[in-house]
Image: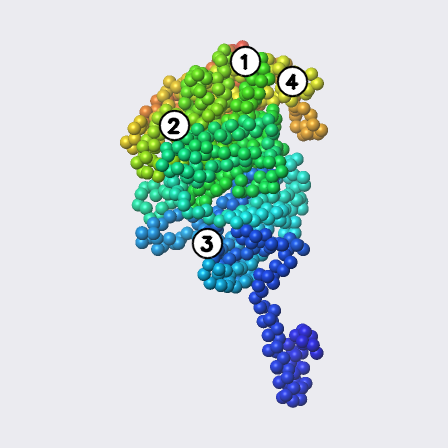
Amino acid sequence: MTRNSLLAQPFYALLAGVASFTSVAALATVMTVQPSFAQDDEDEDEEKTIADVVEDYEELDGLFPMWQDPENGDLYMEITEDQLGEEFIAFSYTENGVLGAGHFRGNYRDQRVISFEKRYGTIDVVEVNTAFYFDEDNALSRASEANISDAILANVKIEGETAGSGDGEEATPTRYLIKANDLFLTENLHQVKASSGPNDQPTDFRIGELSGSKTHYEDVRNYPENTDVIVSYVFDLPRPTNYGGADVTDARSVTIRMQHSLIAMPEEEFTPRFDDYRVGYFFDQVTDLTSPDATPYRDMINRWRLVKQDPSAAVSDPVEPITWWIENTTPVEYRDIIRDAALAWNESFEAAGFSNAMEVKVQPDDAEWDAGDIRYNVLRWTSSPNPPFGGYGPSFTNPRTGEIIGADIMLEYVFLTNRITYTELFPEDGAASQEALEALNHAHDKGKGLCNAGIRLQQDLMVARTAAMQAGASDEEISQLVEDGLYYLILHELGHTLGLNHNMKASIMWDAVEVHDKELTQGIIAGSVMDYPALNVAPQGMTQGDYANRRPGPYDNWAITFGYSPDVDDAGVRAELLSKSTEHGYAFGNDADDMRSAGGGGIDPRVMIGDMSSDMVTYGRDRIDLVQSLMPGLKEKYSNEGDSWEALRNAYLILTSNQAGMGSAVSRYIGGVYVERAAIGQDGETQSYTPVPKDYQKAAMKLLKDEIFAADAFDVPADLVASLQPQRRGFNFFGDTEDPKVHERALSIQSGVLNHLMSANVLDRMTNYQLYGGEYKPAEMLLDLNDAIYGGDLTGKPNTFRQNLQVEYTKRLVGIVGNGGYGPVAQSAALAAIKDVNGRIGWFAFGQDAASAAHREHIKAIIAPVMEKI
């Protein structure tokens, strides 16, 4: 009987074999076999050295030496004993993906601090919580780990170990080898597939489960300070219910390509600079749990490491400039524009004490490095089927200090085209917008992702193009317009990579006349390039001024000084600089303050997107008048022989979208409150909350009455309507009706304004602000709205646009009464408005046709449930 066959016998058979022996000696012989089995097992379990495991593997030396099995691609990673317990930065971004899965090229995803901890025969990969600070001199610091949880992202078996040797400087540490597949070919390091949301529907596009067999390494790049691993994650869904768009080849198998970088902690000679609420920087948020302050914040702004070559000089070149590379995929004709726009930021750095802080180079066509290499800051260029942006400028940082380690700018070719792909232009069409926002919002959760400046700028460019064409502009003038737009986009996105967040209040720098005066503006029409302003198209009869900023504004110079000047490390200098926040041109309000969301959380109408000037009512009226003046000549300008009507349809959508944007921006002044955030006792300090003056709110209502709610607000020549035909592409019209839906377009725009004016937030705020100076009350506002929507129809024959609007508005009034989401005062105001409507429709009985009579009965039926209770 052999050793193996003996071990294979059942226990009872073994006993029977033992009993068959007739001597004790024979039994002893059997018993002595057992220790030899145990010795063999111990030999098999004997620890392997790294050399034993990685024999014939390909070595990639760097921060963490990597070994790859040439047979199956498995990856192994070395960790030295002196790296255990040390902190590293783990950074992940999407190299390629599809919007429906929440990914797009260049999408910065996660940055986190991790450490490696040895636990018996395994290594824990631990994410360290960096959100809190404890003063070491405070006794509370001894409880710094209480009720704060680090996260063990992965527990990986040690496959091989090589003991250290030597002493002193020549000593080598013990090295451990783990199988990197368990870290990188899973979602342990980063969650690639988004979690299900509460509003997800079974018919939504989704990706399946991660395939262990298909997921694979694309590349491994190793350097002394960082290790980069590029992985293609493949998700399988055998029977999808939604096959996605054209960018999804087959929904049963979707690939997301990501790069994971493990980065050595930067050198410690970097002084964090703490945030101030009067200036807008991205920051790494830290709360001091040992501070008694009401605001125990140690939020560290994100900024590059800039050190003067000559610390004693007022202005000095940096030891190492911020260097940008223009990717070699960038169209040659735009490279000079991009370079000049990037270098324009040197003006701001001069104010902060640095000359030549920004440097721009072009990636050679034969460069051996890839644009995804995090050691390079790259202006990248893409052309996507469903563009999520015109430009996108993320950065990643050291969460311990706020130091920016790297950044990229993604530019979309769509910005330079006449393509329209955004649902906000025509909600009935459907497109990629929601997917784009969801993908960007993943990054925005980290505070640094979402940016739609390019999308909005592209729309305004198309308005400006149309106006220029109708004014007989030359090709050179139109080309200059595109250049100005691209120049501004680069300024804006580069601002993000310098640490600046949005400043949606910057467009109030000039009034509605001054903003068109080039001699006055000198290339600066807004206080900051970090706004989403309207492109500054001159109204009829006025000379065209600057379309957009050609230079950073005064706020930008001030903010860069706050972030980068070495002098600001001095508390006195810092306080003096921040005291200027109330000065003209330094106004600041970020995304959390802005009023883009109808009835949302923002309250200051000056903090808005798509606006321009300190007098938005005048500016908005001028722009809408311009839009309406362009409509009659639109068909002639877009009647190119041999073409379809697609370009004409796009132009119509863009113009009406601009009209909607102006109406939206003006509507925010109704029920609005001006907000100021000066420190107590600061020069220029005013009341923190000041309601918009009543006469200006009434002026805003007058504009909406004339330009949004009027019976002729969306009049379009009949021959233009009859030509709003999309170009057919195969069977793309299947299941849809292609006829022009101008009524739906108009009501969609009008409803967008009503969403704000009739929201609980606005109506209840108009009650509350009466306690600190507000004079325009909910009841008066709704009665003015009645007049805007019903006034002028006393003849009893409202046109079809007004009928749609009146039905929609009246339903909303009824919906307020008895709705617990509104305060009692707002409900009372709505009830008064309903009674007023009931009185107005009595006039409709005179000279009515059948359609008007039917409309009158419809309105009566809507308000009947309320009127019966009065």
Q: CA distance from mark 1 to mark 3?
A: 66 Å
The answer to the question of whether label 4 and label 3 lie on touching residues, with beta carbons closer than 8 A, is: no
Quadrant in which the C terminus is drawn: top left
Q: Which residue is mark 4?
A: 723
Q: Which residue is mark 1?
A: 629
Residue projecting furthest to the bottom: 23
Callout 3 amino acid = Glu
Residue toward you, 822 or 12:
12
Measured from the top left, where is residue 812 in percent x and y? 48, 26
Up/down of 712 relative to 760, above or below: above
Q: Which residue is mark 2?
A: 586
Q: CA distance from mark 1 to mark 4?
A: 18 Å
Measured from the top left, where is residue 368 in percent x and y? 61, 41
Q: Nearer the viewer, mark 1 or mark 2?
A: 2
The secondary structure type at the circle numbered 2 is: loop
Q: What residue is drawn where x is 67% and y is 82%?
A: 17
Q: Nearer the viewer, mark 1 or mark 3?
A: 3
Residue toward you, 700 or 103:
103
> Of callouts 2 and 4, which one flags the residue occurring earlier in the amino acid sequence?
2
Q: Nearer the viewer, mark 4 or mark 3?
A: 3
For residue 467, say whether it is visible: yes
Residue toward you, 376 or 664:
376
Q: What residue is drawn where x is 51% and y is 62%?
A: 164
The secondary structure type at the circle numbered 3 is: loop
Q: Nearer the viewer, mark 2 or mark 4?
A: 2
Q: Which residue is mark 3?
A: 86
Callout 2 amino acid = Tyr
Callout 1 amino acid = Ser
Which class describes the residues within 10 Å of circle 4: few (<14), some (14-19), or many (20+)?
A: some
Quadrant in which the N terminus is drawn: bottom right
Callout 4 amino acid = Ser
The answer to the question of whether label 3 and label 2 lie on touching residues, with beta carbons closer than 8 A, is: no
